[in-house]
C-alpha cells in the first residue's frame, strides 16, 4: 500500500465526563467509520468492543459532531467521535436550573440600573 493512499484521521472517545481519549490514525482511502474504529487501539476498550459487536445505542458515533453511520466513508482530517448518549435533554436541564435559581436571582435582568424600566 503506497503512502499516498493513506489519509490521516483522529478517533476520540469519551468514557466518562471530562475525560477524552484520542488517537491519531492513518487509514486507507475508502475506509469506513466502523473499519477505522475496529483497527484502532480503542477497540480493545470493553465499552467500544460492546458497541462494535452490537451496534447498539451505548455509544453515538459522529464525525466532527455530526451523527454518522458506521458505513460512512472517511475523508482526510476527519475526527471520529464516540460519545455516550445524553442523559437529559439540554433544554430541560436549563429549565430546571433556572427554576431552582428563581426568576429574580438569575438571568439577564437580575440587576437593573437605578431608574431603569422593568425588563430593560
Image: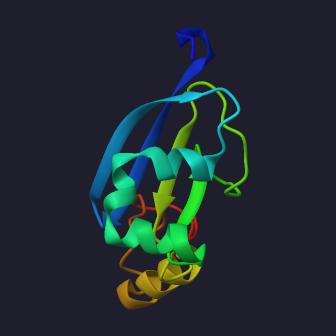
Q: Nearer the viewer, residue 119 or 13?
A: 13
| Residue 110 seen from this side | no
Residue 52 location (% of width, % of height): 52, 66
**Extreme residue in the front direction:** 1
Judged left or right of residue 105, residue 103 is right
Residue at x 33% of width, y 71% of height: 46
Q: Where is residue 60, by image quadrant?
A: bottom right
On screen, residue 103 versus residue 1, left or right, reads left
Please name whichever residue, 119 or 89, is drawn nearer the observer in this view of the structure. Answer: 89
Q: Visible in this render: residue 1?
A: yes
Colour scheme employed for the rendering of this structure: rainbow
As drawn, 1 above or below 30: above
Q: Quadrant of residue 78?
A: top right
Residue shown at 58% from the left, 59% from the top: 61
In this view, the residue in front, 111 or 10, is: 10
Q: Quadrant of the N terminus?
A: top right
* Of 105 and 114, the residue lying toward us: 105
Residue 70 relative to residue 36: left or right = right
Number of on-image labels = 0
The quadrant of the picture occupied by the C terminus is bottom right
Residue at (53, 44) in percent of width and height: 36
Residue 48, image quadrant: bottom left
* Residue 67 at x, y percent in the picture: 67, 57
Amino acid at each position: 500500500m503506497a503512502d499516498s493512499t493513506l489519509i490521516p484521521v483522529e478517533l476520540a472517545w469519551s468514557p466518562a465526563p471530562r475525560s477524552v481519549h484520542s488517537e491519531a490514525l492513518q487509514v486507507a482511502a475508502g475506509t469506513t467509520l466502523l473499519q477505522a474504529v475496529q483497527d484502532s487501539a480503542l477497540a480493545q476498550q470493553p465499552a467500544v468492543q460492546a458497541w462494535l459487536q452490537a451496534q447498539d445505542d451505548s455509544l453515538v458515533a459522529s464525525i466532527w459532531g455530526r451523527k454518522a453511520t458506521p458505513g460512512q466513508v472517511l475523508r482526510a482530517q476527519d475526527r471520529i467521535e464516540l460519545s455516550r448518549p445524553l442523559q437529559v435533554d439540554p433544554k430541560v436541564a436549563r429549565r430546571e436550573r433556572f427554576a431552582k435559581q428563581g426568576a429574580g436571582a438569575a438571568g439577564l435582568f437580575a440587576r437593573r440600573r437605578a431608574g431603569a424600566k422593568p425588563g430593560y
